Image (tube, grey):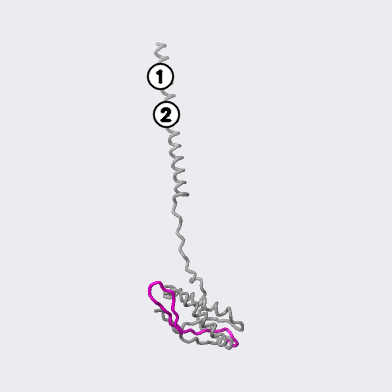
Amino acid sequence: MAKNDKKKQDQEDGAEEGGGGKKKLIIIIAAAVVLLLIIGGAAYFFLLKPEPVEEEVDPGLDVPVPEITQSTTIGPMIEIKEFIVNIISEEDRHYVKASFTIELNKEEAVEETNQRMAQIRDAILLLIGNKTYEELQDLQGKKQLKAELVSKINSFLQTGKVKAIYFTDFVVQ
């Protein structure tokens, strides 16, 4: 009987060792699967994640446009007569027919502006002539043109500055 007891004892010990080995194997496999999932998630996050698309910002959006209010004092005005300018276009011939009024900040600047009218008209013709049909079709393009014109004219005026430019006639065709 002692033989049978010893045999039973050996079978029970073997079953416990085998069961413990199976548990260890399951734990190792589960840990490996969890580790692979973590590595896969990190790889997706860092390598395969689509980059955010940056929207193109129109530079014309940052152009300051003078606000017209009741309390604003109006400076001296000079009218620039109508002119026609060919503009850049890939398909058809396009042109701009325009007239402007320039508002100055000082009365003393009127005389200098009249003396420099050839330079002013030249600057306007060059700036408008380098614009495309598409740029001059929308409001932002026109605002940007105004800001560029103010900057260019102010670059050669010495006794005063241009406060604002007003389109009195502007046709793009």
Q: Does the magenta stretch include residue 7?
A: no
Q: Where is residue 82 in the image (x, y as percent from the top left)?
A: 46, 86
Please say if the residues under marks 2 and 1 sit with CB atoms less than 8 Å apart: no
Which of the 4 image quadrants contains residue 19? top left
Q: What quarter of the picture does the C terminus occupy?
A: bottom left
Q: Position of residue 103 (x, y in %)?
A: 53, 84
Q: What stretch is highlighted in magenta?
A: 83-109
Q: Residue 146 carries which label?
A: none
Q: Which residue is at a point 47% across and 66% down the rendered structure image?
A: 57
Q: Where is residue 4 in the image (x, y as percent from the top left)?
A: 39, 13
Front one among 56 and 36: 56
Q: Position of residue 145 (x, y in %)?
A: 49, 76
How many other residues sit within 10 Å of disc 1, few (<14), some (14-19) or many (≥20)?
Answer: few
Which of the 4 image quadrants contains residue 31? top left
Q: Is residue 103 above or below residue 58?
A: below
Does residue 2 appear to the left or right of 72 in the view shown?
Answer: left
Q: Which residue is at a point 44% across and 79% down the rendered structure image?
A: 86
Q: What quarter of the picture does the N terminus occupy?
A: top left
Mark 2 vs mark 1: in front: 2
Q: Is mark 1 on a helix, strand or loop?
A: helix
Q: Is residue 93 magenta?
A: yes
Measure the C-alpha gap from mark 2 to mark 1.
Answer: 16 Å
Total marks shown come to 2
Amino acid at circle 2: Lys
Q: In this view, does 148 lie above or below 34?
A: below
Q: In this view, does 129 lie above or below 6?
A: below
Front one among 137 and 129: 129
**First in sequence: mark 2 or mark 1?**
1
Amino acid at circle 1: Gln
- Residue identified by numbered label 1: 11
Q: Is mark 2 on a helix, strand or loop?
A: helix
- Residue identified by numbered label 2: 22
